[in-house]
Image (cartoon, helix red, strand yellow):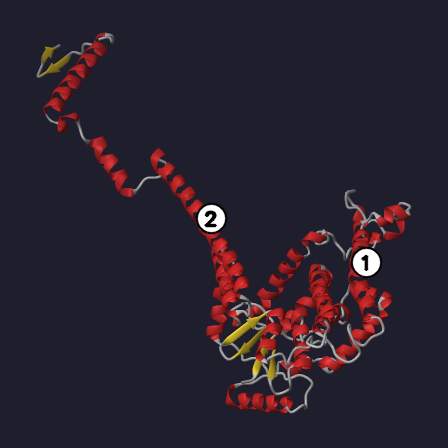
Amino acid sequence: MVLELHVWGPAFSLPSIDAQCLATIAYFTQAVPKGEWVLIPSSDPGLSPTKELPALRNGSIWIGGFRNILDYLRQYSSGQWDLDSDLEQHEKADCIAFSSFVEAHGQPLVDLSLYVSTQNYVSSTRPACSSILQWPNQWIIPSKRRATAKTRTQHLGLSSLDVDTASGASKRSNNIPGSEHIPESLVRRSKETVTSILSQPHHQSHIRLDALTRNFLEPLQDLLGKKSFFFSDEQPTSLDCLTLGYLALALYPDLPQPWLADIMRERFERLCAYVHNLRGSFFGGPVRIEDALSTRDGPAGADEAEAERNKRAKGKGPLPWLAPERGGLTTIGSLLLSNILDSIPLIDQLRASNRLTLAANESNLTEQEKAQVQAIATARRRELFSQVITVGAGISAFVGYLFYTGIVSLPGEEEEMVVGEKRGLADLGEAGAMLAMADYMDGRSQKENTSEHHPVVEVDVEVDGERAM
């Protein structure tokens, strides 16, 4: 059975807009023989039970994530599709350590460059994402990916800074009324010093970005040296594939603010040449969106896709692209429903916990790792249930208080109160009749006392000629 590798679609002349997907594609081109796999730019993490891309499908089995896919390939091929099999033990340790280093330091830089930077995101990244997505994902997924990128880079303290601020001449203060109408030639500018320039927010941001970039790229360039790959001149490793994924997204996108690519070209020429060489040998050069997203409608389209798969499987194409199937009304409806459910605070936590449990069962983990993931999922589920109980108890107490104080009452209770007000003391039996009589006598005496304190007016009335008083 042919393996299906589902990834985010192409962008910036690269096979994918995601670094992990690029790394997985690069690994497949070097480790998996042609004809054994196809590349599907589905750009829909909802297809995989793990809700993540890249995702590998082998029949009914789904594996999500770069590391999990590599572990599955090693077991599936009995070690034949393992690019790290020829490494020495200390080299394997270095490969694992540098891979963690690349993921930890490369992902934040790519996030800052493509997503956190407002100008880069609006001008380049968002249009690139929208071009590979169907409706309604083209309006939902780009903003979600940007929000995730901001969360990942929040610890750097740069997400709140404006790294795309214009020059100081365009940042005149608007505190003085009418200052916007003053001609530019008549504006008196204060004398800038080195300290004042470096203290401006955008300069501080660029200084920190420069330091982060150098701290990431210098160890990689030192490890590469003058070799073709990190550990030899003959055989690439998983570290080469992973590094290519992140450095390609740092170097090739055409951005309004290409600070990351500029630093690479100015100070790390060997790494730039390294990325160019790997891009040509792994991906076959620049990738067009039309190569990956060719349409297929109905049976004719299916035949065309099968012919394209066979052609690329025979080696007549650099990558074994297979166009994703277009979703119908059912797919669109499920996408809308899924996004609505994920926007509800408590339900989204429950769905995330269920996905974590499913990922633990489906992924290629050891029993101990599965137990740890299951424990995390169970703890999250218990926390969710405690939140639900707390919120429910608070709402119940508030509603009970409203009924107790009479601020809110049921319609039937209001009618009973009105009827109760109309009932007299005589309806309470003999004791009620006695109380009613006493109340009547008391009212009558009060009426007589009231009349004694008021003057009496006598009126003469004549009836049939007779006078009466």
SS under mark 1: helix
Q: CA distance from mark 1 to mark 2?
A: 43 Å
Looking at the rendered structure, the number of numbered marks drawn on it comes to 2
Q: Residue at x 79, y 61 (%)?
A: 213
Q: Please, what is the three-letter code of the amino acid marked with disc 1?
A: Asp
Question: Circle 2 is placed at which residue position?
Answer: 387
Asked whether residue 11 is in view, the answer is yes
222 or 93: which is nearer to us? 93
The residue that disc 1 covers is: 210
The percent position of residue 431, horizontal first and vertical second, equals 12, 22
Residue at the front extreme of this rendering: 89
Q: Residue 324 in the image: x percent, y percent?
A: 57, 79
Q: Position of residue 8 (x, y in %)?
A: 62, 73
Quadrant in which the N terminus appears: bottom right
SS under mark 2: helix
Graded by Cα atoms within 10 Å as few (under 14), some (14 to 19) or many (20 or more), the crowding at tag 1 reads: some
